[in-house]
Amino acid sequence: MLPATLPLLGMPLSGAGAGVADGAAGESVLPPAGLALLRWQWHEVEAPYLVAVWILVASLAKIVFHLSRKVTSVVPESCLLILLGLVLGGIVLAVAKKAEYQLEPGTFFLFLLPPIVLDSGYFMPSRLFFDNLGAILTYAVVGTLWNSFTTGAALWGIQQAGLMAPTVRAGLLDFLLFGSLISAVDPVAVLAVFEEVHVNETLFIIVFGESLLNDAVTVVLYKVYNSFVEMGSVNVQAIDYVKGVASLFVVSLGGAAVGLVFAFLLALTTRFTKRVRIIEPLLVFLLAYAAYLTAEMASLSAILAVTMCGVGCKKYVEANISHKSRTAVKYTMKTLASCAETVIFMLLGISAVDSSKWAWDTGLVLGTLFFILLFRALGVVLQTWVLNQFRLVPLDKIDQVVMSYGGLRGAVAFALVILLDKTKVPAKDYFVATTIVVVFFTVIVQGLTIKPLVKWLKVKRSDHHKPTLNQELHEHTFDHILAAVEDVVGHHGYHYWRDRWEQFDKKYLSQLLMRRSAYRIRDQIWDVYYKLNIRDAISFVDQGGHVLSSSGLTLPSMPSRNSAAETSVTNLLRESGSGACLDLQVIDTVRSGKDREDAIMHHLLSGGLYKPRRRGAWRCAQAHASFPLHQPVLRRSCPGRAGRGTWQCTCHQRPPRLCLWTCRRVGTKASHPWRAWRLPPAPRLP
């Protein structure tokens, strides 16, 4: 910056010494230029300024698109962005006489793709993902291998049949290489289109999970075939095929391992940020991006690494960081993903304008479109038939149609085809043109028609509502019942291993990766009970009730299970003389079915669950109330919290309504055998 700043200040770069030397030589010295008040330095800020301008243009375009609800309800946003890119690319080409601002593979893989994948992995519904993990892996691995081999072989077959131009010089390995990059479902395109269609959660997670996990297969096939093309088909040996198969496991498992390691580090780091909350969002983004770069550096699956990092760390990170940090992480991640997705589709449209990078062949283009649709549908039907033999809820024919039609291609395929070496792959220009057509066809044509198709087939749509308390209770109850049934019959199935994992997580991982204040064994029912009590008070104020003083109304932070006093806000307000009825079961202003179900569960908790616990503590206190002071007595399993066995208990103090006990297990050899606690309130002692 110093050489650029000195002319701005009017100072010569040669310095005073140069002027003295020139004077000694007898030459005339030009006077220094005057002070420059303004100097244009576009080259200094060109790169960041263009980045800011493109993001601004993309953001303004999104605003304009959503001004018309009719347009966005029919045309997906990704289609509009590609069309905008085509228009902007045409304007740039007309003005500059050359195509500029292309979608570079390095920019796409290192800067634009990571925010989208991180957002998808971090906010992915983990329960739904792991419930359908078998189907996702089947479509991602077997389906991608099937599509790649069949598409490449079919294209080679129509070339041998003379349906392509003679200028398309490509062999079997070249077509297999092209089939590996054109057959993979793209996560960016699937996310952009399927989020606007709002299909049911199971269908969405299967298609989107496939698009994320097939990255490992795509990377392996692309690198293996590219290496075979560079080596030449005559130089490929049997050991090379074995290495290619082994690399599939290395790339996939290695990428997942890298992501889990960084997830562990991220969760462990956020455990110690209690006094420096300001850096919590920064740590989340830095370590997740470091996982992506590490996997990319080691030639592993970077998409799989950042996905597993987001899935693995969310539970612990959300428990450790503050509420403000969670909000910052959520909106920053969503903003970065939205900006990256917008720029990707816009640059795809701009890149298609540069005709110097592609060559057209009708046979190759039409054959590719036909074969990717045909083999995608065949693969989905065959794999679904096998999966339905083991699924409790089978995938019907309508789901298979949507899955076949939803295999979208996007920027990943375009970036991979641009990376091909034209000296090794002579048909690269034809492959680039075909890839652009396939991407535009799947995103624009299929994106435009998939929503009417879903409506016509009456596909089950997703209902965006949180599960009611009743639904959550029944879901957890059935999980425990199914795990118990599997344990009884001796079949270690999915529910058994999930239950074992939850026990391992509760016993080891949560205690290691969560701070003690965050890791509290809390009963979610009691948390909901407290929240519903708070909503009681809010409803009372909204209905025009008078505000009580602090002495007349105190809200507990947690309803005590051993307290003899009723802590319900409703009862407290009734005792204070208020005429309003705050029982949620009889309030007529319930606004939704979820509120009605929560009201029923509130009545169940306050009337059926809270009182029995209180009465049990009362009986225990009454049993101890008759014991004399300082005289040891033998009791079995009393108090209940101390554990089973024979106990020798002594009452040391007996203040009003309380008794302080110390108990020792009979026959114990522990170094600290004594335990002390205060019993809950009891009737007045004699």
Image (cartoon, rainbow, N blue to C red):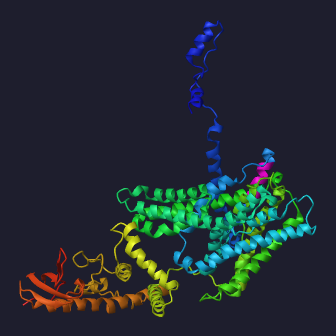
Residue 287 image position (x, y, % from top left)? 50, 58
Q: Quadrant of the N terminus?
A: top right
Residue 582 image position (x, y, % from top left)? 34, 86
Magenta segment, prevailing SS (helix, strand or loop) = helix
* The one of 622 and 553 positioned closer to us in this rendering: 622
Please tell me how many numbered marks the rendered image carries. Answer: 0
* The one of 518 and 525 positioned closer to us in this rendering: 518
In the picture as drawn, the residue positioned furthest to the front comes out as 238
Q: Which residues are magenta?
A: 83-93
- Residue at 31% across, 85% down: 570
User: Up-down: is 190 above or below 669?
Assistant: above
* The one of 449 and 33 positioned closer to us in this rendering: 449
User: Up-down: is 184 above or below 204?
Assistant: above
Q: Quadrant of the C terminus?
A: bottom left
Observer able to see residue 117: yes
- Residue at 22% across, 83% down: 642
